[in-house]
Amino acid sequence: MKIFYCGVILFLSLLSVLPAIVCEETRDVFGVYGEEATLQVSVVQREQIRQVRWVTFNGIAICTSRPGGFVEIREDYYADRLRATSDGSLIIEDLKMEDGGIIKATIYLLDGEDCSEAYNLSVTGKCGTTKRVSVPVGGDVTLQVEENHIKNLIWERPVGVIIATTKPGGFLDLREDHYNGRLQGSPDGSLTIRNVFGQDQGDYRAVIFTPDGVACARVYDVSISGGTSNVKMVVAEYVTAGIVFAMAALP
């Protein structure tokens, strides 16, 4: 009987510390070596968040963040490289290849309905120069890729928010309703945005994967002119030695 009661107490204790639900499925995040990456929490209303605890896939405690920009770093490896946003999301600065891997966030809410989510962070390096394209309001713009032997591409806008995936042959998987009916894939995997307007402004990036595991983020500086809009959209170009290397474990 004592064993039974001990088991019940242990079970209840675990319930008190383990998140009850998963906030969101694992999210892919792509960062650039030497720059920064944002691990965005999925809870929309920051007033609901009490704090967020961040750990690596192998159990190393990174930090604790809170809405308002507070962050308490708990691992010296990240010293002077972490910031928190107004909703408690985590920004990792001066990215290193070793930062790649699974990072888990446990989000503690004021109402006690805690949840957790994970981020698959891949770190790339830069290559090439920014491409510049001009298009009038209401026109179409093609974000042209030049790489050969492409397996698939992930398109982000702003950086960190996936809007679509493409594959050679014209395949397109739309991920954002904002572009519903306005995106088109190309035989080489390039992406065409139709009927552009003011809300299309911002940073775009295509993370390109080849069959041998190389990832490349190609970037465009697109100027939109005419009408009431005079907007610039910037997308940069990067390359990594390989997705497997980028996901190496922390020392």
Image (cartoon, rainbow, N blue to C red):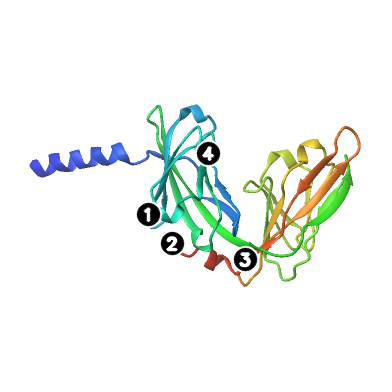
In three-dimensional space, the C-alpha distance between marks 4 and 2, rounded to whole angstroms, equals 25 Å
- Where residue 192 appears, x then y in whole percent? 80, 51
In three-dimensional space, the C-alpha distance between marks 1 and 4, rounded to whole angstroms, equals 22 Å
Q: Residue at x 53, y 55 (%)?
A: 121
* Residue under label 1: 60
Instruction: Rate crowding at label 2 as few (under 14), some (14 to 19) or many (20 or more) other CA atoms within 10 Å.
Output: some
Per the image, label 2 sits on a secondary structure element best described as loop
- Under mark 1, the amino acid is Ile
Instruction: Rate crowding at label 4 as few (under 14), some (14 to 19) or many (20 or more) other CA atoms within 10 Å.
Output: some
* Residue under label 4: 42
- Under mark 4, the amino acid is Ser
Sooner in the amino-acid sequence: mark 3 or mark 1: 1
User: Is 78 located above or below residue 44 in the figure?
Assistant: below
Q: Residue at x 24, y 39 (%)?
A: 13
- Where residue 140 appears, x then y in whole percent? 86, 47
- Where residue 71 appears, x then y in whole percent? 45, 40
Residue 25 appears anywhere in the view:
no
Sooner in the amino-acid sequence: mark 4 or mark 3: 4
Q: Quadrant of residue 52?
A: top left
Per the image, label 3 sits on a secondary structure element best described as loop
Sooner in the amino-acid sequence: mark 1 or mark 4: 4
- Under mark 3, the amino acid is Thr
* Residue under label 3: 240
Q: Report if the CB atoms under discs 1 and 2 are less than 8 Å apart.
A: yes
Q: Residue furthest front?
A: 80
Residue 251 appears anywhere in the view:
yes
